[in-house]
Image: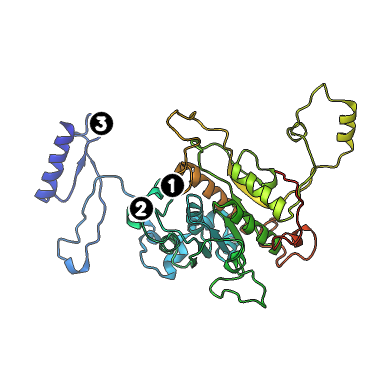
Amino acid sequence: PRLAKFMSAAMRASAGGSAGLLAVPHGRRGARRPVVTRRHVRAPASAATPSSSADASVIGDDDDDDDDASCAFRTRDETAAEFRFEGTRRLYGDRRFEKLAASHVAVLGMGGVGSWTAEALARSGVGALTLVDLDVVCVTNVNRQVLATDASVGASKADTMAARVRDINPLCDVTIVRDFVSEANVEAILGLENRNRNRRDDVDETIDFVVDAIDAERDKAAVIACCVHHRVPVITVGGAGGVDALGDVVVEDLSRATFNRLCQRVRRLLRREYAFPRGEERTPREIYGVKSSGDSRETKARAKGRKKPQGKFGVKAVYHRENVNFFKPDPGTRGRGGMGCDGVGGSAVFVTGALGFKAASHVCLALMDDDGDDGRAAARGPAASGWRSRVWPKGRERGGERGGE
């Protein structure tokens, strides 16, 4: 009854032309103590009349942002560009933001993680993005990919994401590569081919950071080995399929990643086929620091004289541990969500999106950091010595027949 009385009063006020004032009920005594709000609405020039300059009222509080003229800019000009990332500038300062605006990031894979990474990078003000994917949007992508809607089903993922990035920041230099990344083309896609070979001219060779958000483990290993050899900063993302609850998103060296099968498989390939360092042989007891009173004196003596564990890759992995699910599998489910028609397991957007945002956060901070170990200040060009000089191309030096994690 109160809502009906209010609506009828609003209709009478708008129809009767009572100065355009609407009384908003407030508590039980709303009828006695009306709260009147005004908001100026600018009429189109073609509809200008003597009465059109009067104030038109709307229900609700005035928006404080109306006093800021920058919020009214709708045109894609330099005036609007000055305010588009004003919040980011206030947070990090002009000097750091200008570094971000001058950076070029390649995102490989526009799936459940890569699409959110590209979204966050675009909204952070990264100046140039290379978006790589050959796939098209499927209706099964709607549950986890920011680019997937009913309107985009059947369209190219790279094209759809590029249009979205340009709509967010028209000044962003977006390059589209409609291809799947593999060992055969990763150098060409990233512009890292030797000068005496035919190099792609449509991709800027000065890529400052690479985000590996693809699913195939062999392709991920090829991307990581190529970037490590050419000393291009790269971050890889672990699998998110089958994780039903968002817990801690971990960022650590790929050689130390645990409880994520995709990270473990990629790490094994890097050590077996690309001569990545293995580190020392350690037992699970030594890895996790579990002590036992039954350890022999010989074991303690060997541990005392052993060097500290080595073998880090210098490649950060963003992943979620797969042993922390909230629900136990029901009898009707297939393993950890089963495999869908798109070839991936069941997934949730709050997990894939969190991984994408975490990857984007790491990339942005590294690019803005003057002294970052994996930022733009690192040495560039192919490694000439050390194990990094032997990891690419595959087969230059085998890591041995012995497997490893």
Q: Earlier in the sequence, mark 1 or mark 2?
A: 1
Task: Nearest to the eye among marks 3 and 2: give it.
Answer: 2
Question: Which disc, if any, is residue 149?
Answer: 2
Question: Which disc, if any, is residue 27?
Answer: 3
Residue 3 in picture, x, y percent from top left: 18, 35
SS for dot 2? loop
Task: Nearest to the eye among marks 1 and 3: give it.
Answer: 1
Q: Earlier in the sequence, mark 1 or mark 3?
A: 3
Q: Is residue 379 left or right of residue 75?
A: right
Q: Is residue 198 left or right of residue 135?
A: right
Q: Residue at x 63, y 46 (%)?
A: 265
Residue 317 in picture, x, y percent from top left: 63, 48
Residue 111 in picture, x, y percent from top left: 48, 53
Q: Residues within 10 Å of mark 3 (few under 14, many from 20)?
A: few
Question: On the rendered image, what quadrant is the C terminus found in?
Answer: top right
Residue in the foreground of this view, choosing between 369 and 341:
341
Mark 1 vs mark 3, CA separation in Å: 42 Å
Tell me if residue 132 can be seen: yes
Question: Which disc, if any, is residue 21?
Answer: none
Mark 1 vs mark 2, CA separation in Å: 10 Å
Q: Residues within 10 Å of mark 2 (few under 14, many from 20)?
A: some
Q: Is residue 301 above or below residue 47?
A: above
Residue 198 in picture, x, y percent from top left: 61, 76
Q: Amino acid at mark 1?
A: Arg
Q: Residue at x 57, y 74 (%)?
A: 200
Q: Residues within 10 Å of mark 1 (few under 14, many from 20)?
A: many
Tell me if residue 365 can be seen: no
Q: Amino acid at mark 3?
A: Gly
Q: Which residue is mark 1?
A: 144
Q: Amino acid at mark 2?
A: Thr
Residue in the foreground of this view, choosing between 307 and 363:
307
Query: Does the residue at mark 1 contact the one at mark 2 (Cβ under 8 Å)?
Result: no
